[in-house]
Amino acid sequence: MSEARAQKRIFDRAAEDTIVSVERAFEIVEMLADEGDGLSLAEIARRLDVNKAIAVKLLATLEGLGFVWRDDVAQRYQLTYRVSNLGLRQMQQSRLLDQCAPVLKALAEESGELVRLAIVEHGERITWVYAIAGAKRSVQIDPNYSLDISLNTHAIAKAWLSTLPLARALRIIKTKGVEARTVNSKTDAASIEADLKEVARRGFAANLEESEMGVVAIAAPIIVSNLQSERECVGAVSLAAPTNRMSGGDIEACAPMLLETVARLARIWPLDRTLRPLVRRL
């Protein structure tokens, strides 16, 4: 197994606890989600580090289940919308967006900038689930400008990680892998550790062109008291803007309205049973 595939593991499980074919099938789903033009059979087999016969069986299974389709003209595989439909069904069952959307919309309208919500899953990863752009500005950031989350550069990730014990946060970052996305990215252990401590002190994280040049952002964690009266981070909210409109100082000046937003979300966050698998105690 390649180093990249090993880093994508979310939990450290013994080999006998996993089914390789299932793991590979979900790896195909994840890699196709990042490829707008799809991937060829040869490329999928190469990334999985398997021969084409195995890749064909995996793809045929996913195609039969309706998660993948094959473009016979381009000879490339792509995801169907069944995958996104499953995610939407889960979100509708949790009623999360029904309760959070008005609060997030208010922040987007007040700031005029891009607001995004991410949730913490099983205490081990953070995932984007919602985005809304303010309508006051003529030039806006594409809500889908960055769908993956780099733990050492994205403000949303740093906001979540700052709520964890430092040793655990650093371990999660190391497992995912440290990325240098721009010249401003913090990549050495000392800088990352100091950054997380500063985030914990201030209550919000900053990304000053660390993940993408021309974009600055701040983010704050959503901390709730669960049904057992234990405090936990269930998600985070980010506010992002282009640098031709906001400097680092300008975006950080928006911290009070961001902190008020996460406080409001914490008060209304649904703690029913449907959301319990998404969070774990600090």
Image: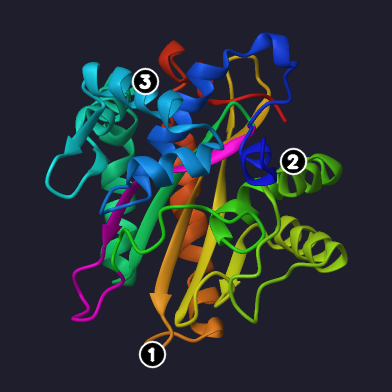
**Residues at circles 3 and 1 in contact by the CB criterion of under 8 Å:** no
How far apart are the alpha carbons under marks 2 and 3? 41 Å
What label does residue 164 carry, if any? 2
Is 152 included in the stretch rendered in magenta? no
The residue indicated by pointer 1 is 244
Q: Circle 2 sits in a helix, a strand or a loop, which is it?
A: loop
Which of the two discs, 2 and 3, labels the residue nearer the N terminus? 3
Rendered location of residue 206, percent (x, y): 60, 68
Do labels 2 and 3 touch, CB within 8 Å?
A: no
Determine which residue is flagged by label 3.
57
Image location (x, y in percent) of residue 173: 72, 49
Question: Left or right of 139: which side holds 13?
Answer: right
Seen in the image, is 50 located left or right of residue 147?
right
Residue at (74, 41) in percent of width and height: 164
* Among numbered discs 3 and 1, the one appearing first in the sequence: 3
Residue type beneath disc 3: Lys
